């Protein structure tokens, strides 16, 4: 039997299934709660239980301490309702964030291609369209298991039935080595759910944007580039993509052609471990070299945590306002655990 969940300050209640997290029930009812990883690893979804009881699940002590639980806090992505609830999110609900209902989807693999070192492009044609915002992610369900892995959509929201994912192989990974780099073939059926996450460029903005991606962190940035340019959401975009060598770069021709066709867009591939006729070094240093000041600009960052942390520091040093820096970090084998304005 479902319980009734009310979010303080929001109109009406939604049904909270006892076997679903409060976050999942909210998103399925098209009610927004702040979240990023949806896996209990970032803490973005922390809520205060004002009334009622939850099962906290098994949250990591470093993300939700015993003392926090005792004081009435819980993680919306881990907690399930035991009674009717009234809750209040600790983080602000971004007024201009993405707002799309979470849904289960099924689709057919259209394309599966090696595009860079240990990296594949997976294109799925969905049976039904998925509404999402540029920058969000979906969870792919590994067949024959309850395991789901998170990957950002690389296509713009206008292509709501044809989803593109960039997937890095993980040694011994159940989803990658055992499936996407193993048994998966074009024509196979696939299950997924989405959209999730709040890393997104949704509304028009006055500030030119600097996008910095490492490895397959390029995926949500590609979606943002295509969506923002075709809807005239930003005055200009500088996209930096970092890799160790040329074997790690992909979609180079696509971005070079876009740069040639659209004066608002500039593409900067950067290699950290190989000399070539382009930029070399750490990708964030390339940003510093190009911009004496980042004041009045915004940034969207996606990649390994060390790269994202370095980029945040570099941009602040160049006087970018913290409220205009948006970051999504991913660990190897999954997509994003953290997204927030800095
Ligand atoms: S801990 Fe719940 S969204 Fe990250």
Image (tube, rainbow, N blue to C red):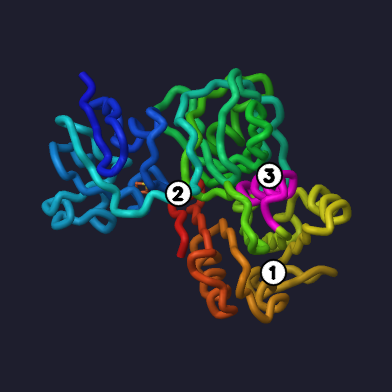
Residue matched to label 2 = 95
Magenta range is 219-234
Residue at horizontal 79 percent and vertical 52 percent from the top = 255
User: Viewed as shown, does residue 143 lie left or right of 218?
Assistant: left
For residue 179, what is the image quadrant? top right
> Does the magenta portion include 258?
no
Residue 210 seen in this snapshot: no
Q: Determine the secondary structure under disc 3.
A: helix
Q: Which mark is residue 273?
A: 1
Q: CA distance from mark 1 to mark 3?
A: 31 Å
Residue 284 vertical position relative to residue 260 in the rendered view, above or below: below
Q: CA distance from mark 1 to mark 2?
A: 41 Å
Disc 3 Cβ-to-ligand 1 distance below 8 Å: no
> Does the magenta portion include 232?
yes
First reached walking from the N terminus: tag 1 or tag 3: 3
User: Viewed as shown, does residue 146 lie left or right of 233?
Assistant: left
x and y, in percent, of residue 122 in the image: 65, 34
First reached walking from the N terminus: tag 1 or tag 2: 2
Nearer the observer, 178 or 197: 197
């Amino acid at each position: 039997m479902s319980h009734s969940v009310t979010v303080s300050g929001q109109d009406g209640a939604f049904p909270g299934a006892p076997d679903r997290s409060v976050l999942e029930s909210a998103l399925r009812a098209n009610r927004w709660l702040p979240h990023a990883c949806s896996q209990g690893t970032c803490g973005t979804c922390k809520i205060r239980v004002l009334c009622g009881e939850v099962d906290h699940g098994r949250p990591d002590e470093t993300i939700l301490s015993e003392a926090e639980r005792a004081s009435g806090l819980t993680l919306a992505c881990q907690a399930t309702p035991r009674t009717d609830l009234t809750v209040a999110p600790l983080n602000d609900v971004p007024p201009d964030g993405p707002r799309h209902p979470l849904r289960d989807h099924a689709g057919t693999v259209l394309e599966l291609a090696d595009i860079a070192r240990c990296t594949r492009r997976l294109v799925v044609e969905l049976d039904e369209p998925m509404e999402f915002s540029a920058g969000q992610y979906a969870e792919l369900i590994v067949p024959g298991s309850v395991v789901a892995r998170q990957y950002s959509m690389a296509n713009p929201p206008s292509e709501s039935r044809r989803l593109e994912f960039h997937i890095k192989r993980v040694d011994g990974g159940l989803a990658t080595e055992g499936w996407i780099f193993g048994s998966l073939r074009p024509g196979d059926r696939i299950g997924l759910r989405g959209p999730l996450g709040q890393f997104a460029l949704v509304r028009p903005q006055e500030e030119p944007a600097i996008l910095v991606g490492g490895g397959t962190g390029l995926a949500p940035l590609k979606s943002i580039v295509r969506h923002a340019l075709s809807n005239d959401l930003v005055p200009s975009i500088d996209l930096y993509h970092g890799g160790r060598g040329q074997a790690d770069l992909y979609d180079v021709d696509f971005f070079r052609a876009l740069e040639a066709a659209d004066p608002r867009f500039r593409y900067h591939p950067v290699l950290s471990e190989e000399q070539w006729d382009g930029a070399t070094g750490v990708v964030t240093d390339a940003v510093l070299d190009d911009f004496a000041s980042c004041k009045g600009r915004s940034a969207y960052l996606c990649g390994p945590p060390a790269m994202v942390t370095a980029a945040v520091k570099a941009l602040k040093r160049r006087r970018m306002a913290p409220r205009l820096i948006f970051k999504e970090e991913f660990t190897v084998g999954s997509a994003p655990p953290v997204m927030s304005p800095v």
